[in-house]
Amino acid sequence: MEITALQKKVDEWIKTVGVRYFSELTNMAILTEETGEVARIIARRYGEQSEKDSDKTKDLGEELADVLFVTLCLANQTGTDLQAAFDKKMKIKTERDANRHFNNEKLK
């Protein structure tokens, strides 16, 4: 599914189920909260912190989807075409990093 389709799907959900968008500032706070939940899982499951029993049932995919959902909301609210922005960013990264990572001794 293209990002544009995801943006439309979120917008339809907001209009039919969610009543209205939260303000941009509220959604930024929610995005920060959701990102923190992802960080907690990663730190405990893949990092050095021990994972509490209550964290073992947390679904990383679900938390990442929360981050994506709120990001799509913010894009819709601010009139950002995420598909165009993503495509542009991938082009920039591809041109800039064409050989950079292959020549990085740390990655070998």
Image (cartoon, rainbow, N blue to C red):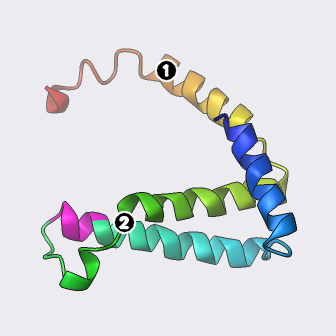
Query: What amino acid does circle 2 point to?
Result: Asp
Crowd around label 1: few <14 · some 14–19 · many ≥20 (10 Å) = few
40 or 11: nearer the viewer: 11
Q: Could you tell me which quadrant the C terminus lies in? A: top left
Q: Which residues are magenta?
A: 42-47
Residue 1: x %, y % from top left = 64, 35
Confirm whether the magenta stretch covers residue 79.
no
At 41% from the left and 73% from the top, the residue drawn is 37
Crowd around label 2: few <14 · some 14–19 · many ≥20 (10 Å) = few
Residue 27: x %, y % from top left = 69, 72
Confirm whether the magenta stretch covers residue 43.
yes
Residue 88 placement, left or right of 98: right
Q: How many numbered badges does the structure rendering display?
A: 2
Residue 49 placement, left or right of 38: left
The mark found on residue 59 in the picture is: 2
Residue 56 placement, left or right of 50: right
The secondary structure type at the circle numbered 1 is: helix
Query: What amino acid does circle 1 point to?
Result: Thr
